[in-house]
Amino acid sequence: MRIFRGSIYLLFLVILIIFCLDNRELVDLKLGWNVFPDKGTILIQLPVFLVVLSAIAIGFILGSLSEFFRGYKFRIDHRKSIKDLSKISSELKEMKSQEKSQKEELLSLIK
């Protein structure tokens, strides 16, 4: 299984390197408002592969964060359920021990 996973990672790495080498052309990336072209915009020239990989990384990060916050209420409910289960379990153990002591008292009265 480790060999299979390693070969998949290696294949992905080779494809990524080929993609990066084939897309080295520079593109203009404008940051800012395009209302006034002379003022307020920053022009950066980056290779295409860097723009594409950055967009994928930002999308991955934003998706992970949104999934984290979406599941927040479920994690809180899970913690509360575990806490309640622990409390109920301890109460059950206490009730069983009380039941044993009551049975012992009844048996001692019978004898």
Image: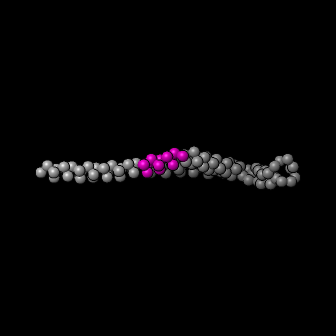
Q: Residue at x 49, y 46 (%)?
A: 77
Most common secondary structure along the magenta stretch: helix
Is 80 on the left or on the right of 37, as rendered?
A: left
Q: Residue at x 26, y 49 (%)?
A: 99
Q: Residue at x 78, y 51 (%)?
A: 31
Is 36 on the left or on the right of 76, as rendered?
A: right
Provide residue 70's location: percent of width, then percent of height.
57, 45
In the image, 70 versus 94, the foreground residue is: 94
Provide residue 69's location: percent of width, then percent of height.
58, 48
Is 93 on the left or on the right of 55, as rendered?
A: left
Residue 4 visible in this rendered orientation of the protein = no
Residue 61 visible in this rendered orientation of the protein = yes
In the image, 71 versus 38, the foreground residue is: 71
Is 2 on the left or on the right of 35, as rendered?
A: left
Report the label total: 0
Q: Which residues are magenta?
A: 73-84
Residue 66 falls inside the magenta stretch? no
